[in-house]
Image (spheres, rainbow, N blue to C red):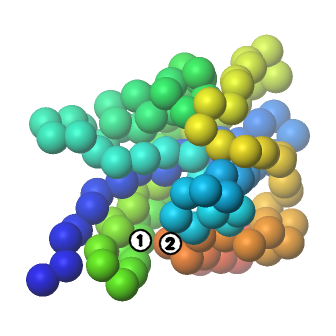
Amino acid sequence: MKKIVKVVGAIIENENKEILCTLRPKDKSLGNMWEFPGGKIESGEEKEEALKRELKEELNLEIDIDRYFMEVEKEYENVIINLTCYICKFSNNMSFELKEHSGFVWLKRENLTSLVWVPTDYPIVEKLINGK
């Protein structure tokens, strides 16, 4: 039986209605693919607590979570990823630094499909664009 890994992701939207997309390093699994920042939920952690911790670790960013967006489950060869995503608002006076990603870009929702995403994130991209 495959292990289920519970993870959280942030859809970080700025004041220009653009979404932060982060690039996985080429030496990691799914390298050079784009993703929404986030990571694994640690034992005993609540989802929102895990997301805040991950954003601090990955982006040195402290941000408030606006609302729940959706949940996705994706089966890979050796693992099942269960991803819960939240919308987070980024104001122009905030800043961040890449600590674990090799690049980033801010994109309007309708341009998100111009990137090659990790498979788990495609349903999120689709919902962001189509509102479904």
* Few, some or many residues within 10 Å of mark 1 (<14, 14–19, 20+): some
- Circle nearer the N terminus (2, 1): 1
Quick check: can you spot residue 110?
A: no
Residue pointed to by mark 2: 120
> Which-is-in-front pick, marks 2 and 1?
2
Q: Is residue 89 left or right of residue 79?
A: right
Label 1 secondary element: strand
Give the answer, above or below, for where 24 lies relative to 33: above
Quick check: can you spot residue 114?
A: yes
Q: Is residue 13 left or right of residue 41?
A: right
Label 2 secondary element: helix
Which disc is residue 72 wearing? 1
Please tell me which residue lies in front, 72 or 65: 72
Q: Is residue 22 left or right of residue 43?
A: right
Tag 2: amino acid = Thr
Q: Residue at x 79, y 15 (%)?
A: 93
* Few, some or many residues within 10 Å of mark 2 (<14, 14–19, 20+): many
Residue 90: x and y in percent read: 70, 30
